[in-house]
Amino acid sequence: MRQFAGLLLAVVVLVFSLAAKPAAPPSFSDNFNGGHLARWWFDPPNATPSWRIDDHVLLSPVGDHKALVDQMVFSSQTIQTSVYLTPDLFGAFGGVTLWYQDATNYVSVVVYPAEGSITLYEVIDGIATVGHYGGRTWIGQWYRLRVNADSVTGAMAIYLDGVYAGTHVVQTDIRSGFSGLCTGNGDVDIDYTAAFDNFKVARPAGGKKK
């Protein structure tokens, strides 16, 4: 009887311990080693050629495109990726998109060597506000881009290769939406605009949807 009582107590303690453990904040990551894009959707949806995985990295179509995480919406978040811009086009850019509602309302933060370093596009009803941050960047080189976005204050802290590049405070009141990757510019004679690896987006611990 004592053994049974002791076992029951241990089970009760274990159950309460598990119940008390806080749930991990929502997150999504992809290193593209799985060879599929089942958790992504694309804007525009029918690009030719399409987004594709080659040698464990994600290659974008040529031109202006977005790849967004399917069925997950984030407000406050940390979003990051490794990005490589094709050496065949100086005007290529690529990076991350967040708070995406539609093709006329979103924020993108990109590595854009032709404009200096990091460029932020805050698009509201199709009209873009542009900001520039950080030092010189180059095509044909891998970079690690990270953005810490606070949906309450609207502040976006930007980091390149772990180095703080600056903070942009958005004007938009739409501070929730889809998150993902973006590219821009291109030429019919090149194979892709940008390559991506080790993407991750996560709501900070204790973060709340707005």
Image (cartoon, grey):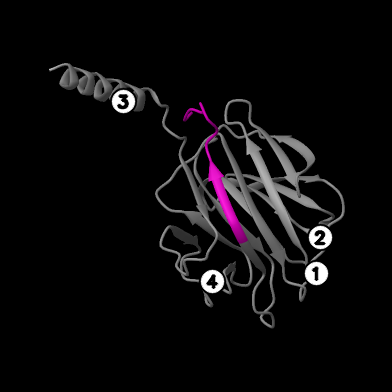
The picture quadrant where one finds residue 151 is top right
Residues at discs 3 and 4 in contact (Cβ within 8 Å): no
For residue 14, the mark is 3
Q: Are marks 1 and 2 in contact (CB under 8 Å)?
A: yes
Give the residues drawn in magenta, as a range: 197-210
Mark 1 vs mark 4: which is more N-terminal? 4
Dot 3, how many residues are within 10 Å of its Cα: few (below 14), some (14-19), or many (20+)? few
Q: Is mark 1 on a helix, strand or loop?
A: loop
Mark 2 or 3: in front is 3
- In the rendered image, which residue does mark 1 sit on? 90
Q: What element carries label 3?
A: helix
Q: Which kind of residue does numbered mark 2 sit on?
A: Pro
- The answer to which of marks 2 and 3 sits earlier in the sequence is 3
Q: Residues within 10 Å of mark 1 (few under 14, many from 20)?
A: some
Q: Which amino acid does label 3 sit on?
A: Leu
Contact flag, marks 1 and 3 (Cβ < 8 Å): no
Q: Which of 142 and 192 is in front in this view?
A: 142
Q: Which amino acid does label 1 sit on?
A: Phe
72 vs 53, nearest the viewer: 53
Hey, what amino acid is under mark 4?
Answer: Ile
Specify whether residue 198 is painted magenta. Answer: yes
* Residue matched to label 4: 53
